[in-house]
Image: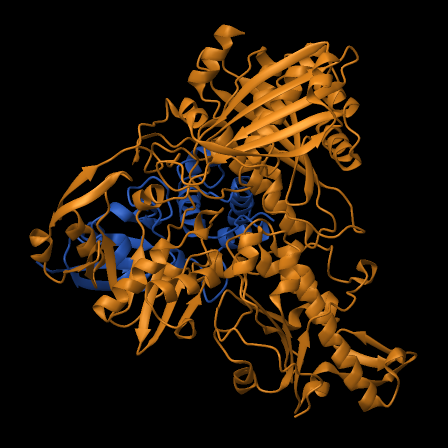
Chain colours: A orange, B blue
Amino acid sequence: MKKTETKSTVKNRNTGLRRRDFFKILGGGIIVFFSPWDALELMEMPAEQARSLPKDFNAFVHIAEDGTVTCYTGKIEMGQGIITSLPVMAADELDVPLEKVKLVLGDTALCPFDQGTYGSLTTRSFGPAMRAALAEAKGVLMELASEKLKVPASQLVAEKGVIYVSGNKAKRVTYGELTRGKRIEKFLEVKPPVKDYTKFIYVGKSYKKVDSVEKVKGEAKFTGDLKLPGMLFARILRPPSHGATLKSADTSAAEKIEGVKVVRDDGLIAVVSENKDKVDEAIVKIKAEYEFNELPVNDRNLFEWILKAQTSSSVSNTAGDIELGRKQSEHVFETEFHDVYLAHAPIETHTALAQFEGEKLTVWASTQQPFPLQDSLANELKMPRDNVRVIVPYVGGAFGAKNAYQQAIEAARLAKLTGKPVMVVWTREEEFFYDTFHSSAVVKVNSGIDREGRITFWDYHVWMAGTRGAETVYDVPNRKTTSYSRARNAPPVHPFATGPWRAPNNNTNTFARECQIDIMAAKAGMDPLEFRLKNLKDQKMIDCLKAVADKFGYTPSKFPSGRGIGIACGIDAGTWQATMAEIKVDRTTGKITVLRLACAQDMGLCVNPQGALLQMEGCLTMGLGYALTEEVLFEGGNIKTLNFDTYEIPRFSWVPKLECVILDRKDQPPQGGGEPAIIAVGAAIANALFDATGARIYRVPLTPTRVLEALKKA
Amino acid sequence: MEKTIQFTLNGKKTSVTIDPGQNLLWVLRNHFGLTGTKFGCGIGFCGACTILIDNEAVRSCQLPVSEVEGKNVLTIEGLAVDGKLHPLQQAFVDNEALQCGFCTPGMIMNALALLKRNSNPTRQQIIEAMDDNLCRCGAHVRIIKAIEDASVKMRGGK
């Protein structure tokens, strides 16, 4: 066995497979290990998060003796298409045929540590780390080929899994031949140079989803589709409200149902049975009493409540002098915008299957966070992390919801208590009740324009939404952003859990900013596109606006024009985008119908334009929901919108003509694609409403009732 | 009280001895191992559990298994013949009319019922027929296109 390099200082995280076990399972070949730190540094993670991350090495890529390249990633596939796009990047970096690349996803025993699949980070952060590992692997292959062919590496060329001597294609060796009988480990600490994008063969072309066929056949396995011998289904007793504490529970009636067992353990009361119907029948037979201690907040007094909360503030994005800007203003604007709680509502509810084999626990879960879940399971069940394995099958949509994984902890606890494999499939009501909602928020924007329609100052205040997407974007000399969040040790603000939604909180900030821009454009007597272009220096945004206007066939007009066209733009996950909407408004019912939505985005190098297009279309379509109907209704901790009858998500009849443009930016690093196109849908539609009718709504969703009220005031 | 229920499942005569009140969705998934039919909401709002009973789209999540006595049940697993995709399945693949794929079986079954009763639907008829099947990923425009394409293929067009 040849070793090119080993570092004795390297400590394994002792998760999953130990290094030496890799070869036992995989046979010979070349394995490149990497430290996740390189990748994480790119992510600008909060300091406390970065500190808690373990330092470890784990395998990243394996080149087998038959030339097959296997990439291991802790990322998961939830519909966003990395299962299609990551092999494309790998094939190009390593110069192997695309069909030779295999992917192992979301298995803590096989894959290197990963912090989770969220934030549109896979392509822009994991991608470079993976490419670096592959560049290293290729370096090893070139070295081996040089020895074998007795030619200096500088005279060798790699192409489709074959290395040959430049100018003499007959003198060649395949990757498989090079790795045969070898066991080579490489550790990656310094990133080697990655390939120039101009040399890419695969990247930048369009690829269809590789998982489509098994999904249309119904053969693709999601967590709930798994079955183990003796497996029990479980239902867990749930409180009627987040403010409720269990006082007592009478489970006698449930226990009488044949084949049902009641399990009680430290606040957890569950019914289990091999028969799914029986647990559904049994759970409602439990008579429980609760004490209620609700926060005095509901969907009606929510915004006053938020503004009264004990907060701490942080200031960012400061330049110039707000007061000076105010003095220079011809018109000053003070506007308050509101955003509501939103549910993620993936069609697959949170699901998990847990099984103990002796001391070893395996959990299959629909989660975006296999490794954090592994840690939590080890903590909750007081087990060594080594004994916990998390595997993530296909995930049936997540949108941020499945960063939370309570269902998997529940399944594992019940598997331990019953000694049998346990499947937990949340009901739709549980899914809505325990969802980590998109946070409700308040934004106050004070701004001004001068006589020429230039923005003089921008004083931006945001409560509970944070600053993602709160960049001013426009060229404003005097500006300041103040973000207010719950003060340390202050009473809770939200009566339930909140967490990242698709493009978390960027929707809130983009809605406020882009509505305010239109309000100023109207006062300035300018077309909203021209007003934006006049106040922009950011070339990427100018390009996006021009591209979307071009696609839309937009012509400037007096404003409001009566045409029902709205514009909005913003930046998310490193991607710049501009959106246009055309709507019609039924003045009798207040119903908005969206006729067209167009979006142009600059996402840097686009790895798989077809996949990116699907994500853009998905974002625009999903965006219709938060713009038009989606709103969690609640009274204290009691959620009233618990299924799709009361929480309305977009339907076929809502979907307009969609037009997407991806700007050609091959010379720029790839950026996020799963979220950016959703951020401006709300503002574009609200601005279109103003353009159509002169009515302005300062919050989402733009329900018929709110439209009718606004029409009265207009 | 258990009862033997006889019916045709994906073209084959079958029977199951079971509590007749059992939910069809879970009988299909757990007893027959046909997990292509999904649980989404449990009360017929989302359509992830859609199957065909005697050529009509039915939400299986609220139907007692006794209802299929003597009937012809078709699930997503019964569509491909000898590994060859049904034209609707192929059209979903060709148009990339899915993302996470969880709602997909229900979408395809609901679309199949539509095409069985109306082989040449207008776009508006497709939208109306599909409107109660929910997709959260936002594949709607492509699903409509896939159904239009499949309708042409199934009528013998190209």
Q: Is residue A76 left or right of residue A530?
A: left
Q: Is residue B9 visible?
A: no
Residue at 34% across, 28% down? A297
Foreground residue among A666 and A537? A537
On screen, A530 above or below B129? above
Q: Is residue A523 visible?
A: yes
Q: Is residue A313 left or right of residue A390?
A: right
On screen, B126 above or below A395? above
Residue at 57% across, 11% down? A693
Q: Position of residue B114 (x, y in %)?
A: 42, 41
Foreground residue among A671 and A56? A56
Q: Quadrant of residue A84?
A: bottom right
Say which quadrant the C terminus of chain A sits in.
Answer: top right
Say which quadrant the N terminus of chain A sits in.
Answer: bottom right
Q: Quadrant of residue B149?
A: top right
Residue at 50% across, 78% down? A17
Foreground residue among A210 and A709? A709
